[in-house]
Amino acid sequence: MPGPDYRYFTTDALTGEVLAHDLPLSGVEFGPELNGAGSMRGLLAPRYARLAPTQAEAGTVLLWAERDQRLLWGGLIWRAKPEDDRLPLEAAGFGSYPGSRHDLHGNLGGRGPYPGTDPCTVIRDVWAYLQEQPDGDLGVSVDLPPGGCPARLGDAEHPYTTKEWEAPPLSNVIRDATALDGGPEWTETVGWDGERPDRRITVAWPRLGTRREDLHFANGVNIVQPVPITSSGDDYAQVILALGAGEGSAKVRTVDAVRNNRLRLEHVLDRPSITDPTILAQLARAERARRQQTAQVDEITVVDHPAAPIGSWAVGDDVQVSVHDQWTSFDGWCRVTGYTIRPAEGDQPETATLRLTRAYTTGV
């Protein structure tokens, strides 16, 4: 049975004109990540090197990856430097672009200052500001969570500002918005909108992704490489003291705890921007559930399989992982923080490497 058909093509970042309809790449790997720009790498053979100056120029050309006519990845080519008899291309997702743009007008062109503002709004403002400047429109849309985020950037006394004489990188503003306690998460997504590649920054709160009951990864089924499992008590806790907004006896606080025939271990979850006791209790419960997982799987490499077809998961999803070997048995939920797809080449099958962390929660 033939494998999936991959196609790589390039477009002009400003006009959208297709420059190379089928760029001949080998050694390809690509994928997105959580709260960061994904990446793509590939090799252009020397006989095609003449294509690079016009069809794969760094800093102004978009590179795309399509699998069986489904658009999976897109981003900017940042580097194309010959190495011996090959030309490696290195690209990064659209989330990398704010790192090369600066606030030249202050407060994102007058959208700020931000005296206690939803950080999701600030992320949207960054993209609106950078794309309204001449020759700066990448055609990226920003999707925000319907209810916003309860965390706040700045306050009435100390509003969050960016100063034109400092010209901070716009990636720093996005980083500040996502670094807040209880702040939002983001990733990149692409797809076809008719004949146009659609490109989006998806911002979510309280989380990206969802619990995927329909997917399962297991060694002997679709996991194809040995999986190291880490067991550590440093991060374990079955008692969570969550602290929210306020001072002294007025501080919002809650305790989420269980007894499970283990030595009591505690953790303090500090979320000073949270004023709602119900939200704080939800965060405490989620943190307790996450910290009760003693074993951790950091990475798995899988093949295409009906149990979890390649491309069926998304960044942020919780997925079921089962690993049984001579060292341990692990059956649990893990969260996808990024993944890298490697198309089949020669004798090597198509694979995907998923980067994992403890599951986000067990009930939300």
Image (spheres, helix red, strand yellow):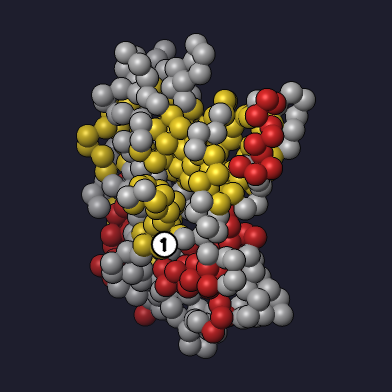
> Where does the image place residue 53, in percent across and percent down from the top left?
69, 42
Find numbered disc 1 in the image and state the secondary structure of the residue it sits on: strand
Q: Is residue 122 above or below residue 156?
A: above
Q: Is residue 102 left or right of residue 301?
A: right
Task: Give the class, few, some or many, for how many residues have Cα within 10 Å of label 1's Cα (few <14, many ≥20).
Answer: some
> Where does the image place residue 238, in percent across and percent down from the top left?
34, 47
The residue depicted at 66 percent of the width and 39 percent of the height is 52
Residue located farthest toward the bottom when viewing the structure as drawn: 157
**Which of the two residues, 84 or 33, is positioned nearer the viewer here?**
84
Residue located farthest toward the right when viewing the structure as drawn: 84
The part of the image, by quadrant, that contains residue 145 is bottom left
**Which of the two residues, 273 or 92, is positioned nearer the viewer here?**
92
The residue depicted at 52 percent of the width and 88 percent of the height is 157
> Where does the image place residue 303, in percent across and percent down from the top left?
38, 22
**Which of the two residues, 128 or 225, is positioned nearer the viewer here?**
128
The residue depicted at 71 percent of the width and 76 percent of the height is 166
Residue 252 shows up from this direction = no
The part of the image, by quadrant, that contains residue 331 is top left
Q: Name the image quarter holding the N terminus.
A: top left
The residue depicted at 62 percent of the width and 42 percent of the height is 56
Residue 304 shows up from this direction = yes
**Which of the two residues, 317 or 278, is positioned nearer the viewer here?**
317
Q: Is residue 74 above or below residue 244?
A: above
Q: Is residue 32 above or below residue 204?
A: above
Number of numbered tags placed on the structure image: 1
Q: Which residue in the protein does label 1 denote? A: 141
The part of the image, by quadrant, that contains residue 87 is top right
> Where does the image place residue 191, in percent across and percent down from the top left?
37, 47
The amino acid sitting under disc 1 is Ser
Q: Is residue 53 left or right of residue 336?
A: right
